[in-house]
Image (tube, rainbow, N blue to C red):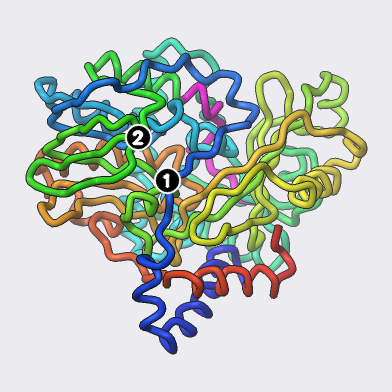
């Protein structure tokens, strides 16, 4: 079973149970309402969070209100203002910009969407168009970062997808052969060439993706914040939105008792979206874990042979992914996943989850045995059952826009989806109609308790729960 099957099969068990108890499934949101909670970012990257802007202290009337100050929100606000400098655009962030997944992820910059990554789900011409679109978006993001003056935010140096088994390696070889004829420049690397790149012979093969790289998550947040503000966006931090009242003029009710009126609303709330009563049955917020070592000496780094410095991820059900910072810290994420009851917000990662990361790191690089982690953190990933993202417009008045369901590919997709949201908000739908992730209907995820039962049953079955 590959990693794209895990969540789908687990929640399918919950769906089956829900069908036998449909009434309970239907009343669950009323009986078990979700409450707005925003956990704090404790990641290594948090040291580079830009200073907070002042919170909103008075009522506000704008053309576009963006809820969420992560990659999606900052990108959408930036693109909307760039296309329409006369529009009043405000970003409302519950904590500080990048507090969520944007500022605590595993630092990989990848092309394509998760369900199409190194496998062809769509027709070949569509697969190629998605790939080319995401590569072009990545280039635009790199250019924006360069213009911001923020150093070390993006390093487009390529990445590897490694394989755990020979069977998976053969599928990787077949994929590369099929898409190189489409002009997609991936390359198959055998065990020796893989080891030469990343210093471990643990994998029988890998696929090299040149249009990929490494990011410093919070520095990228900073660059996007600067770009949005330079475009005229107003950003209010420590300004939580509690509820949304839809209408021709949406009304947002703030924790500080202010009211924000907005003709258009952008939901840029990622795995927290269900707490505003949207997409509860489309997204499952699943916790992932990341840890980082101290800075390695040049001699220590040389001993493990990670010459290319490229980030990489493996092919397991619960994927591991690794990167190397400019100051030689190794960060490793994945390996286990957790779901908190009723889309809940968990605390810091437990010792078991961190120990799994340590075990995997020393399996790959035995020379690092005994090394301790300098930081360990967790954060929610917004998962869909089919691993495909979604971007579009919703609401009774068709004036609420969204981008979510990134399933681990959000660093690049959020910037692209911000651009798509800007076009949709301006009524420019036509350029995007051919892409399968625009205004799509995702597979249904049941409510509690069936959601919890399905996910827990699957992780228990595989012995991978954290």
Q: Is residue 217 magenta?
A: yes
Label 1 Cα crowd, 10 Å radius (few <14 / some 14-19 / many 20+): some
Q: Residues within 10 Å of mark 2 (few under 14, many from 20)?
A: some
Residue at the disc numbered 1 = 36
Q: Residue at x 41, y 65 (%)?
A: 121
* Circles 1 and 2: CB atoms closer than 8 Å: yes
Is 335 in front, or is 33? 33
Measured Cα–Cα span from mark 1 to mark 2: 10 Å
Instruction: Tell me where residue 71 appears, x and y as whole percent.
Output: 40, 33
Position of 407 with respect to 204 (left or right) is left
Residue 420 vertical placement versus 456 (above, below): above
Q: Can residue 137 be seen in this snapshot?
A: no
Residue wearing tag 2: 255
Looking at the image, can residue 310 be seen? Answer: yes
Q: Is residue 104 left or right of residue 432?
A: right
**Image position of 52 with respect to 174: above or below:** above
Q: Secondary structure at mark 2?
A: loop
**Residue 166 percent location from the top left of the image:** 72, 65
Residue reaching furthest to the top? 149
- Asked if residue 228 lies left or right of residue 307, the reply is left
User: What is the total number of numbered labels drawn onto the structure image?
Assistant: 2
Q: Position of residue 240 (x, y in %)?
A: 37, 34
Q: Quadrant of the N terminus?
A: bottom right
Q: Secondary structure at mark 1?
A: loop
Q: Quadrant where the C terminus lies?
A: bottom right
Q: Earlier in the sequence, mark 1 or mark 2?
A: 1
User: Magenta span has 179?
Assistant: no
Q: Nearer the viewer, residue 385 or 122?
A: 385
The residue lying at 48 percent from left, 39 percent from top is 38
Which region is colored magenta? 206-220
> In the image shown, does 172 or 328 lie closer to the viewer?
328
Residue 345 % position (x, y)? 54, 49
């Amino acid at each position: 079973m590959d990693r794209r099957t895990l969540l789908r099969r687990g929640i399918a068990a919950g769906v089956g149970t829900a069908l036998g108890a449909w009434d309970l499934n239907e009343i669950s949101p009323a009986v078990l309402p979700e409450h707005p909670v925003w956990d704090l970012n404790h990641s290594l990257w948090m040291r580079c969070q830009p200073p907070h802007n002042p919170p909103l202290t008075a009522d506000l009337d704008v053309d576009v209100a963006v809820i969420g100050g992560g990659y999606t929100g900052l990108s959408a606000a930036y693109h909307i203002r760039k296309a329409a400098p006369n529009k009043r655009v405000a970003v409302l962030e519950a904590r500080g910009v990048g507090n969520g997944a944007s500022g605590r992820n595993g630092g990989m910059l990848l092309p394509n969407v998760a369900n199409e990554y190194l496998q062809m789900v769509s027709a070949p011409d569509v697969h190629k168009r998605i790939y080319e679109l995401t590569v072009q978006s990545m280039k635009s993001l790199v250019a924006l970062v360069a213009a911001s003056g923020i150093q070390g935010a993006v390093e487009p140096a390529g990445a590897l997808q490694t394989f755990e088994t020979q069977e998976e390696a053969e599928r990787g070889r077949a994929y590369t052969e099929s898409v190189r004829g489409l002009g997609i420049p991936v390359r198959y690397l055998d065990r020796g060439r893989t080891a030469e790149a990343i210093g471990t012979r643990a994998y029988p093969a890998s696929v090299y993706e040149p249009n990929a790289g490494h990011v410093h998550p919070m520095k990228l947040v900073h660059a996007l914040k600067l770009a949005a503000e330079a475009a005229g966006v107003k950003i209010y931090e420590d300004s939580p939105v509690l509820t949304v009242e839809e209408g021709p003029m949406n009304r947002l009710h703030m924790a500080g008792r202010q009211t924000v009126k907005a003709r258009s609303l952008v939901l840029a709330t990622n795995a927290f979206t269900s707490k505003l009563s949207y997409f509860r049955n489309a997204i499952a917020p699943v916790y992932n874990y990341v840890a980082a070592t101290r800075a390695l000496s040049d001699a220590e780094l040389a001993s493990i042979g990670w010459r290319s410095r490229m980030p990489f991820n493996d092919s397991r059900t619960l994927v591991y992914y690794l990167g190397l910072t400019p100051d030689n810290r190794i960060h490793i994420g994945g390996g286990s996943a957790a779901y908190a009851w009723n889309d809940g917000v968990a605390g810091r990662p437990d010792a078991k989850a961190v120990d799994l990361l340590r075990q995997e790191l020393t399996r790959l690089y035995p020379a690092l045995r005994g090394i301790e982690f300098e930081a360990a953190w967790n954060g929610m990933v917004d998962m869909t059952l089919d691993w495909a993202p979604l971007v579009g417009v919703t609401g009774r008045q068709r004036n609420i826009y969204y981008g979510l369901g990134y399933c681990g590919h959000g660093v690049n997709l959020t910037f692209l989806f911000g651009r798509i949201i800007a076009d949709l908000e301006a009524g420019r739908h036509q350029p995007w109609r051919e892409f399968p992730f625009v205004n799509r209907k995702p597979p249904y995820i049941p409510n509690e308790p069936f959601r919890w039962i399905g996910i827990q049953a699957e992780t228990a079955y595989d012995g991978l729960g954290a």
